[in-house]
Image: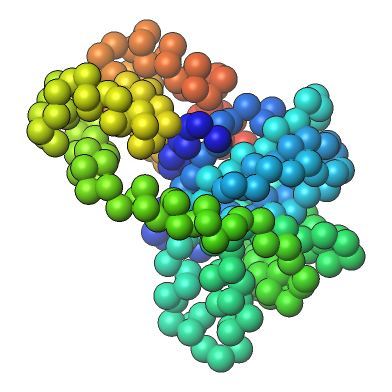
Amino acid sequence: MSEFQQEIVPINKDDLFIILNHPNAKFDYPVHYHPEYEINLVMDCTGTRVVGDSEETFGRSDLVMVGPSLPHAWKSEAETNHVITIQFSADMLTYPMVSKRIFAPIRQLLQDSVHGLSFEGPEQAAIKEQIIALTRMQGFQSVTTFLGILNLMANANRKRLVTNLYEQELGANAKSRRISKVCEHIDKNLDKELSLSEVAALVNMSDSAFSHFFKKRTGMSYINYVNNQRVAKACTLLAETTLSASEICYDCGFNNKSNFIRIFRKKKGMAPIEYRKFISQMLIKY
């Protein structure tokens, strides 16, 4: 796992959770992470799953929950991969309702998910049935079913995927003040030029020293990281606004529309307008 790409998921503060139902997934997204919880149900294929420092093969059906900021990815050679993804805020653990005694098993599930959790056997089948049913629901019934899925997972036998050693190493990397300062500056200024020299000066380093330092810490070049963040912001704007591709191009810091489309297509496998149509068909918000 040489490159961890941050994904910005199409969820906002008014959503309890979102579902992406993708019957023809290509598994072309690199190892990535995001601050939200995620439940991933993979069907109709076999392949390899990466979660943290765990890399395992999976069978015709794979059910995994990953906690906030835990890197993960699925890979498969199959032409047909059906994936249902449920994502919800890391703030759920602090919701007043979840603090009540009856939610104790779910609180433990959320805490355990920082290790990555795999569910198998008859319990997986029961949870799978409920997840599929959830994709067809609307209104308050979807909320009770979602909580029911969490309760089934909380009381199921589950396999821990990530080692403590990996968590310690990840924690040590996260403590780099210089990297945190740089990433915060990038996130706040994506619509600006963000030259390498400017950002290197921010942490009192030469251009060459900063390039080496940044790649060692993040697993990717500075330019690649900035482009990833710009594309992630563009995905959010395409999913949640009616802004044109031209407007989004400049809001995300790309210097021209053709460059925006070229980089977006390279990262996402489709043009921005194609992505907007795709996400509108696959995304359900609650």
- Residue farthest along the front direction in this orientation: 165
Q: 206 or 253, which lies in front?
A: 206
Q: Residue at x 14, y 36 (%)?
A: 203
x and y, in percent, of residue 229 in the image: 36, 32
Q: Measured along the vertical axis of the image, is residue 206 above or below residue 72? A: above
Which quadrant would residue 96 be assigned to in this image?
Answer: bottom left
Task: Tell whether 139 sits left or right of 119.
Answer: left
Is residue 23 visible in this depiction of the protein?
no
Q: Residue at x 32, y 21 (%)?
A: 223
- Residue farthest along the top direction in this orientation: 258
Q: 150 or 157, which lies in front?
A: 157
Q: Residue at x 29, y 19 (%)?
A: 254
- Residue farthest along the right direction in this orientation: 122
Q: Residue at x 82, y 60 (%)?
A: 120
x and y, in percent, of residue 217 in the image: 35, 37
x and y, in percent, of residue 138 in the image: 65, 60
x and y, in percent, of residue 14 in the image: 42, 60
Task: Tell whether 231 sits left or right of 157.
Answer: left
Which quadrant would residue 113 be assigned to in this image?
Answer: bottom right
Task: Tell whether 69 sits left or right of 28.
Answer: left
Q: Quadrant of the N terminus?
A: top right
Q: Measured along the vertical axis of the image, is residue 182 above or below residue 221? A: below
Q: 243 or 153, which lies in front?
A: 153
